[in-house]
Amino acid sequence: TYFFRGTLKAGSGPETATLKLEYADFESLGQARENFSPLGTYSTNPFFSSVDTTLDGRTQNNGFESRTKIFNSSLNFDISFGDYTVSLISGFAHYTAAEKLDVDFTALNILDATHQSEAYDQFSQEIRLTSPDTGRFKYIIGGYYQGSRLQADDFVIFGSFMNGLGMPFRILGDTQSERQFKQTSEL
């Protein structure tokens, strides 16, 4: 895990600027989960006989990988005119996430390499005028825009284990199921 954050400030008097940056990178190999205590026919069915249910701090599967990267930034620029302040605020956010998981939780090649991924971007811009902080009537007038984009994909690979089963499972061997999602928004 890596995480960095920083702030830069510049200017004095009527003009000031503040830049904030943030970056994170999270990577995992392996997973903190394990199958144990099977109930009912799960413990006697030959289909599940290869599932490791010994509670020993180890899981028997074909792996887990995960990585997420995040970047956030904002720039705030303030200009004072007497007792009034004009603020320009820009923001950008981005992240990517990817995960690969053996979802049958066995060493057999049944439902292996479920891949999930997401990518997200967001941009925002704000402008506002702030009145003096004195007197009876105080106000803030402004406008705001935000646009974002999200894409998510996942697919499941049906492994070669399915080829050894009877119909209708045999036709799934060495195939995959894929889903995609895309969304954009503006406000």
Image (cartoon, grey):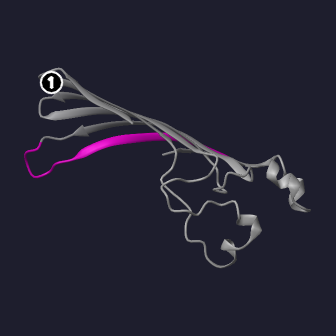
- Residue 14 visible to the viewer: yes
Residue at 87% of width from left, 52% of height from top?
163
Task: Please name the predominant secondary structure of the magenta segment in the image.
Answer: strand
Q: Position of residue 66 (x, y in %)?
A: 53, 42
- Image check: 98 left or right of 14? right
**Dot 1: few (<14), some (14–19), or many (≥20) neighbours within 10 Å?**
few
Residue corresponding to mark 1: 14
55 vs 94, nearest the viewer: 55
Q: Which residues are magenta?
A: 133-154
**Which quadrant would residue 106 be assigned to in this image?**
bottom right
Name of the residue lying farthest toward the bottom: 40
In this view, 22 is above or below 163? above
Q: Is residue 177 left or right of residue 133?
A: right
Q: What's the amino acid at mark 1?
A: Pro
Please provide percent x and percent y for residue 130: 21, 40
Image: 150 above or below 71: below
Q: Nearer the viewer, residue 157 or 80?
A: 157
Say which element carries label 1: loop
Residue 111 is inside the magenta segment: no
- Identify which residue is drawn at 74% across, 72% down: 45
